[in-house]
Image (cartoon, helix red, strand yellow):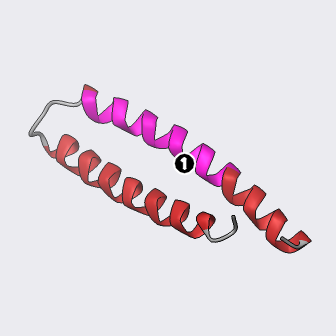
Amino acid sequence: MNLPEGFLAENLDEIIRRSTLRLEQESVHVGMLQEGGNQHISAKATLKQGKAALGRLKAYRAKFD
């Protein structure tokens, strides 16, 4: 792995770490909202999109191993 790839991999690792923490916080938030309410539905959809994006980011990161 050359320097730019190593730098990119390190930055991706940090982004993944922070994103994972943020999604954990969002998951707690979703759990605190009244189920079936508009805010719950919206927050749950946002959480689902975030998890999908994190999955794509992890797949991209795997290309640097």
At label 1, which amino acid type do we have?
A: Ser
Q: Based on the displayed image, in which of its 4 quarters is residue 24 positioned?
A: top left
Q: Nearer the viewer, residue 20 or 47?
A: 20
Q: Residue at x 64, y 53 (%)?
A: 15
Q: Quadrant of the N terminus?
A: bottom right
Asked whether residue 15 is drawn in magenta, I would say: yes
Predominant secondary structure in magenta? Answer: helix
Question: Which percent across, then down, holds residue 30?
Answer: 28, 35
Question: Which percent across, then down, holds residue 14?
Answer: 69, 49
Q: Residue at x 69, y 64 (%)?
A: 65
Left or right: 38 in relation to 17 = left
Residue on which the image places disc 1: 19
Left or right: 12 in relation to 48 = right
Tell how many labels.
Answer: 1
Residue placed farthest to the top in the image?
32
Is residue 5 shown above or below 34?
A: below
Question: Which percent across, then down, holds residue 48?
Answer: 30, 53
Question: Which percent across, then down, holds residue 8?
Answer: 77, 66
Range of residues picked out in magenta: 14-31
Q: Based on the displayed image, in which of its 4 quarters is residue 52 positioned?
A: bottom left
Asked whether residue 18 is drawn in magenta, I would say: yes
Q: Nearer the viewer, residue 61 or 47?
A: 61
Q: Nearer the viewer, residue 10 or 46?
A: 10
- Alpha-carbon neighbours of circle 1 within 10 Å: few (<14), some, or many (≥20)? some
Residue placed farthest to the left in the image?
36
Q: Residue at x 52, y 66 (%)?
A: 59
Residue placed farthest to the right in the image?
3
Q: Secondary structure at mark 1?
A: helix
